[in-house]
Amino acid sequence: MSDSQSRFGFVSFAETWNGRLAMMGFVIGLATELLTGQGILAQIGLG
């Protein structure tokens, strides 16, 4: 990667990692919900 390419903002690199982390968060949240039997809001005391 050259110095002229940015890793921040609306660039392909940042959007790819944002998507990957969002998918991981969704899967982890779903797995936690399935394992505990409580929704995410109930787990943090809001539900």
Image (cartoon, helix red, strand yellow):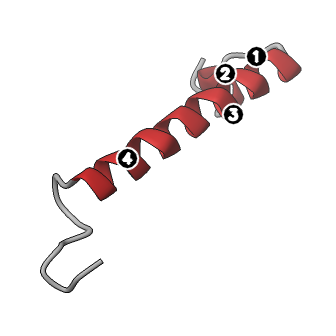
Q: Do the residues labelled 2 and 1 touch (CB within 8 Å)?
A: yes
Q: Do tag 2 and tag 4 residues touch (Cβ < 8 Å)? A: no
Q: In this view, does 14 lie to the left or right of 4?
A: right
Kind of residue at disc 1: Gln
Query: The residue tagged with tag 1: helix, strand or loop?
Result: loop
In the rendered image, the quadrant that contains the N terminus is: bottom left
Labels 2, 3: front one: 3
Q: Which mark is residue 16?
A: 4
Residues packed near mark 2 inside 10 Å, few (<14), some (14 to 19) or many (20 plus): few
Distance in Å between CA atoms under marks 4 and 3: 18 Å
Looking at the picture, how far across and down is residue 26, in whole percent? 57, 28
Q: Name the residue under label 2.
A: 42
Which residue appears at 41% of the width and 39% of the height? Answer: 19
Residue 37, image quadrant? top right
Quadrant position of the C terminus in the picture: top right
User: Please, what secondary structure does the residue beneath circle 3 have?
Assistant: helix
Is the residue under label 3 in contact with that under label 2 (CB below 8 Å)?
no
Q: For the residues marked 1 and 3, what is the alpha-carbon distance in whole angstroms? A: 14 Å
Residue 4 lies in what quarter of the image?
A: bottom left
Query: Between disc 1 and disc 3, whose residue precedes?
Result: 3
Q: Residue furthest bottom?
A: 3
The residue where tag 1 is placed is 38
Give whichever of 7, 43 is nearer the camera.
Answer: 7
Q: Which amino acid does label 2 sit on?
A: Ala
* Residue positioned 31% across, 57% down in the render: 13
Residue under numbered circle 3:
28
Q: Is 22 located above or below residue 42 in the figure? A: below
Residue 41: x and y in percent read 59, 23
Q: From the viewer's perspective, is residue 46 above or below residue 16?
A: above
- The crowd level at tag 1 (other Cα within 10 Å; few <14, some 14-19, many 20+) is few
Percent x, y of residue 34: 80, 16
